[in-house]
Structures are given as C-alpha cells and as structure tokens.
Image (tube, helix red, strand yellow):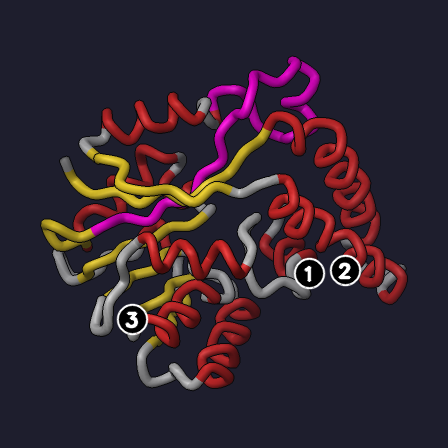
Amino acid sequence: MSLRFHEIAESGHRILNPITEDKLVLLGEVARLRPGTRQLDLACGKAEALCQWALRHGVEGVGIDISEVFLRAAQERAHELGVAGQVRFERGDAGSHRAEPGAFDVVSCIGTTWIGGGLEGTIELMLPALREDGILLIGEPYWITEPPEEAYESFGFGPEAFSSLAGTFDRFEAAGLEVLEMVLADQDSWDRYAAGQWWTLSDWLRANPDDPDAEEMAEFLRRARRSHVEYGRQYLGWGVFVLRRR
C-alpha cells in the first residue's frame, strides 16, 4: 500500500491505529507519563498520541514521519490542543533517524515496526535514543489463533510476520526487554480503524473516477473490506506494549 493510499484512506482518522481515544488515554496513564517527560515518536503519523499526552501529562516531544500530509495534520492538532510549544515535528524516514543517544525518556513506534524491517530491527533502531531506565512503547499485531493458509494472501503478509501474543513476549525477551504493561485493541477498536476507512475511500473514488490510481484504489478497498470481515476480526490482534531494558 503506497503512502498516498494511506494518506487518502486515513484522511478521516485522527488515530492511525486500531486503538480508541479512550485506550490512548489509558495508555498514557499506564505508561506513567509525567510533566517534562521527553518522548521521541517514530513514524508518528498525525501524532495524536504525542499531542494528547502533551496536553494531559505535560510531555514534551518530537515526532518523525515521512508524510507531509500527516505532519501538517499533526501541527494543526498541536495548535488546536494548545501544545505547539511542547511538541515539534520533523519530516523524514523514521527508519534512518538518528537521535542524540540517551536523550529521551520514552521512545515510541506505535504500529509501524516495518520501519526497521520488523519488530527486532525496529527495537534496535529505538534503543540508542532511550535513556538507561526509560521505556519503549511499541504497537504490534499478533496472531490470536493461527489463520488458515488462504488468509495470508488476503492479509498480504506471511505467518512469519507476526507471532502469537505469547510469542511476541518471547521476541521482546530475546531482544533484552521486559514487558511492564500492555493495552490491547478489541474488535470494536479494529472495526473503527478498518471500517472507518471504507466510506472515506468510497467517497474518494466517486469524486475521483479519472484518477490514475482509481482502479488500484477500488481493488484495495474491495480487498480491505473482505480481509477484515473474513479473517482480520478472527485472527489478527493488536496491542501497544510498555517495555524497558532487562
């Protein structure tokens, strides 16, 4: 899925992951965020988490994302919430961003571990910027139960892309991390994220029938709807995990 497709599909979303605003608030609480906490958010999208936590907990932070569209929305949101003086945003490839070593209390990558080629590679990207006793916030899918073989073609990735929830804990442990807390999506969270894109995409297709990407976008919409209702709701989980070095 191209960046442009993401920008169009998620144009009506503030949170670009299957997590509700209530659970985003909960995540900030269980992560024990405090005034003055410094956060680096890699692939921040529209930076709803960073902006909300700046407002609620006094966090100060930096968001990195490759999308000008998402960063423009992030900046508007920061001004709307009155936290523009606490957060700033940089356009760039989060996978190649190199922050000052040990400069942040929190380093987050919520739902975009593809930036490091997967979970393990993304953890390696995140750790250098984290102070010794700081925390990581990582959003990652996991298999609820093992899907049938035909599901992988629908998902667009293979069984090795993720693990079970317990297997995800094993991956964290192998990377030298301890899981402190977690906030998991539920079916409604997934529905609001996935189904919330369908109307947006349908409206875009009606308004842009002659766009060069219209045919591919229509096929993406068809596959996304089918994949979610046939396989996603049953087999694919998602959560944000609060971690620190062991």
Give the image location of residue 15, x and y in percent. Answer: 55, 60
**Identity of the residue drawn at 56% across and 19% down:** 145
Give the image location of residue 187, x and y in percent. Answer: 63, 40
* Disc 3 residue type (three-letter): Val
What residue sits right under mark 2 in the picture?
Answer: 200
Which of the labelled discs sits on residue 31, or is there none? none
Rendered-image quadrant of the C terminus: top left
Give the image location of residue 114, x and y in percent. Answer: 44, 41
87, above or below 40, in the image: below
Query: Which residue is more in the foreground, 43 or 132?
Result: 132
28, above or below 195, in the image: below
Mark 2 vs mark 3, foreground winner is: 3
In contact (CB < 8 Å): disc 1 and disc 3:
no
What residue sits right under mark 1 in the picture?
Answer: 8
Horizontal side of residue 227 vs 172, given as left or right: right
In contact (CB < 8 Å): disc 1 and disc 2:
yes
